[in-house]
Amino acid sequence: MAINFDFSTEVQEKITAGHVRAHDEKFRVTTSKMTGKLAGIVGISTNPLANPFCKSMQNVEGAVCQNCYSCRMLLSSRKSAITAWTANTVALSDDNLSDEMLPSIPDGAYVRFNPHGEITSEAMVRNFFRIARRNPTAHFVLFTKRYELVRRCVDEKSSNVAFVASAYHLNKPVDCVEGFDTVFRVFTPEYADSHGVKINCPLRCNDCKKCWSTDGG
């Protein structure tokens, strides 16, 4: 079922507060300690509820986005994250984002760009790459459905960033995407069983780290 983007007053007020926070001179891009499958990974999330691309994907029949766990979470159990992730969205979408607003990452950390959220623009891609260059001992991975935005900025990519192409459609096999290191596909258990699909993501990210590889492995 598609996500309803007709927000309550509470949600809209938190989004507005995020826009205000992003323009505070003391603002810094917020990082998160992830939990569950992503425990031990550093996350830099943005707000899919404030992203026009995410809204547009609700009209794409069979799109994975119609089952977006990030949107559903922000509209229920994690409303408290809306303001911070909106501020990240606004700041990271700014071509003029200052170096002082970029986060410092612990040496050797594994980081996921947009564990929640999606790219808004080329400016966001470039700012992600700036974060990676600023933290050369950390390891970064970017999951995205916006393949062309990434390709346009690839010359600015540093060697500590891997690209993962997120598949658009549920239950649609995709083996590779030009310019990306690997592909993340989403299958229902029923489809996987009936088509002999081997789920390639059985471990906690911090125990596997395959998605951070740039050698196709």
Image (tube, rainbow, N blue to C red):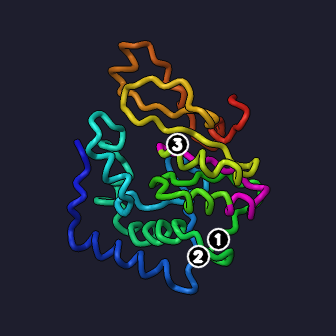
| Residue 40 visible in rendering | no
What x and y, as percent, mark residue 166?
Answer: 49, 38
Question: Any mark on residue 17, and which?
Answer: none
SS of the residue under disc 3: helix
Residue type at numbered disc 1: Leu
The crowd level at tag 3 (other Cα within 10 Å; few <14, some 14-19, many 20+) is: some
Proximity of marks 2 and 3: CB atoms separated by less than 8 Å: no
Read off the residue under disc 2: 28
Residue 194 placement, left or right of 210:
left
Residue numbers of the magenta segment: 130-145
Could you tell me the amino acid type at mark 2?
A: Arg
The residue shown at (28%, 69%) is 11
Disc 1 element: loop
Crowding near the residue tagged with mark 2, few <14, some 14–19, many ≥20 C-alpha atoms within 10 Å: some
In space, the residues marked 3 and 1 are separated at their CA atoms by: 24 Å
Across and down, in percent, residue 38 comes to 55, 47
Callout 1 crowding tier (Cα within 10 Å): few <14, some 14–19, many ≥20: some
Residue 98 in sight: yes
Amino acid beneath label 3: Tyr
Q: Earlier in the sequence, mark 3 or mark 1?
A: 1
Residue under circle 1? 102
Q: Nearer the viewer, mark 2 or mark 3?
A: 3
- Is 35 situated left or right of 57 in this image? right
Residue, disc 3: 147
| C-alpha gap between disc 2 and disc 1 | 6 Å
- Closer to the chain start, of discs 2 and 1, is 2
In whole angstroms, how far apart are the C-alphas of marks 2 and 3? 27 Å
Q: Residue furthest front?
A: 152
Residue 31 occupies quadrant: bottom right
Vertical order, 13 against 39 (above or below): below
Q: In the rendered structure, which disc, 2 or 3, sits on the residue that comes first in sequence?
A: 2
